[in-house]
Amino acid sequence: MGSREQYELAAKAAGITIRGWSFSSKICSGKEEVPFIDGTQGKSSKRFWNPKYSDCDAFRLAVKLGFVVYTEIPSDSEIKDERHAVRMSIFNMAVEKGEQDDAEMRELPIP
C-alpha cells in the first residue's frame, strides 16, 4: 500500500476530507506527497495535514478516533525519537481502522 493510500484511509477513518496534495519540504523531506485539508477558516483556507510528522496532527487524529495512547519505551530500546514512534503508531492504527471501515462497507448488502 502506498503512502497516499495510507493517508486517505487514516483521514477517512477520522472523517477528515483531503482537499488536495502537494510536496512540502517544510512538512517532511519533500520526497513524499502530503495532503492538505480545510484550515481553521473552513473551506476558504487550507493547511497541510501530516500526522506522521506533526505531533499536533497525530494527537488530533488520536482524539478524533478515541484512541487511548500509552507508551512505555524500555531503556534498552533502539528507538531514538520517542515522539516519532508514537506518531507512527497513531497513524498506523488510523490506517488499520480505515481498512476495517472499508471492509465493513464492502460487506453491506446493496438494497
Image (cartoon, grey):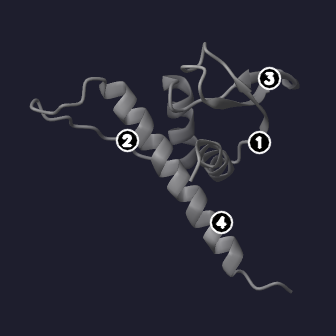
In front of the other: label 3 or label 2? 3
Which image quadrant: the C terminus?
A: bottom right
The answer to which of marks 1 and 4 sits earlier in the sequence is 1
The answer to which of marks 3 and 4 sits earlier in the sequence is 3
Looking at the rendered structure, the secondary structure element under dot 2 is loop
Q: Is residue 83 left or right of residue 75?
A: right
* Outermost residue to the front: 31
The answer to which of marks 2 and 1 sits earlier in the sequence is 1
Looking at the rendered structure, the secondary structure element under dot 4 is helix
Pointer 2 local density, CA inside 10 Å: few below 14, some 14–19, many at least 20: few
**Residue designated by label 1:** 17
Pointer 4 local density, CA inside 10 Å: few below 14, some 14–19, many at least 20: some
Query: How far apart in space, not on screen, are marks 3 and 1 (Cα)?
Result: 11 Å
Which residue is depicted at the point 35% across and 33% down? 85
**Residue designated by label 4:** 102
> Residue 25: x, y in percent?
61, 15
The answer to which of marks 3 and 1 sits earlier in the sequence is 1
**Residue designated by label 2:** 69
Query: How far apart in space, not on screen, are marks 2 and 1 (Cα)?
Result: 24 Å
In front of the other: label 2 or label 1? 1
The answer to which of marks 3 and 2 sits earlier in the sequence is 3
Query: How far apart in space, not on screen, are marks 3 and 2 (Cα)?
Result: 28 Å
Looking at the rendered structure, the secondary structure element under dot 3 is strand
Numbered mark located on residue 82 in the image: none
**Residue designated by label 3:** 46
Tell which of 50 and 15 is nearer to you.
Answer: 50
